[in-house]
Amino acid sequence: MKIKTTLINICCLTLLLVAGLPVAQETASGDHVKVRWLAPDTFRQGMRETVGFYFEVDPGWHVYWRNAGDSGAAPRFDMEAQGASLGPIEWPFPTRLRVEHLTNLGYSGNVAYLFQLLPDKRTQEVILHADLEWLVCKVDCIPGFATMSLVRPVAEQAAWPATDLALRNYFANRLPGGESESPWQPVSISARGSEHITLQLSGNRSDEIPSIFPVNGDLYSASEPEVQREDEILLYKFKRMPGSEISESSDFVITDSSRAWKVSAPSYLKGELRRARPLYGFYFCQHLLPVSY
């Protein structure tokens, strides 16, 4: 009888210990959103991988880009890793989303937020922990919160589920490339008065007008800018956010709807030329003569 009681106690203790062990939470869900990892079954030792979070969003709802626009909020990812080093979140190029009188920047439908992961030398396992926050909107918005984790071995070869690898590659191709790769090059940004800012681009695609998205939502309105063409020059006239100050340069994402590039445009401030090359007599005169703004 004493042996039987002892065995029962041992079994109960074992169950309690197992129940207390951390379990990898590889998926999460909230109202109108499901989230899961995009990651290989096995990481390759010494090889950098692009991995991320895949958001499945109900039709008619949307989540946000890094600059969310007039309303909404970008998702937040607080990540920790054991056995690996992580890069920052990388954002596929967005679209403009009209919500009544507002313009938001984000993704209508499914999207993957990606980042780089490099396994440590001689590690046999990668463990990730992430706290997530997001906002999903239609007209009204609903916040979401989740804690996710991932445990994967490290071996001589990486192994991906075919479906997840295809999804990863699709969204990786929508990440902005470097400025040197862009067919459109920034020339300058300039402001007259307090209501508008003009971005000047030069390019060799005379038949195309790319979409452009400002990274700084505190300075630029998310609404569609007015566009004018002057030979090989494109002028984008953005609405300026009230009370904002122009910095020496501004970052933008340019896209032709299939690929994208991140560029940085220098500013003309108070008639002073900053790191830009003048293309017109107007800018030459502006550089020589004092101009009041």
Image (spheres, helix red, strand yellow):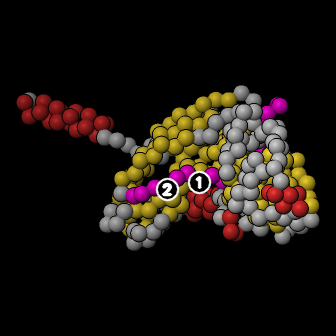
Residue 58: x, y in percent? 69, 39
Q: Amino acid at mark 2?
A: Gly
The quarter in which the N terminus is drawn is top left
Frontmost residue, 16 versus 71: 71
Residue at the image position 64 percent from the left and 36 percent from the top: 73
Q: Secondary structure at mark 1?
A: loop
Residue 67: x, y in percent? 67, 43
The region drawn magenta spans 84-104
Give above or below for 140 relative to 34. Answer: above
- Residue 125 seen in render: yes
Instruction: Give the Cα distance between marks 2 and 1.
Output: 9 Å
Numbered label attached to residue 90: 1
Q: Secondary structure at mark 2?
A: loop
**Tag 2 near tag 1, CB within 8 Å:** yes
What residue would you read off at disc 2? 87
Give the quadrant of residue 231. Answer: bottom right
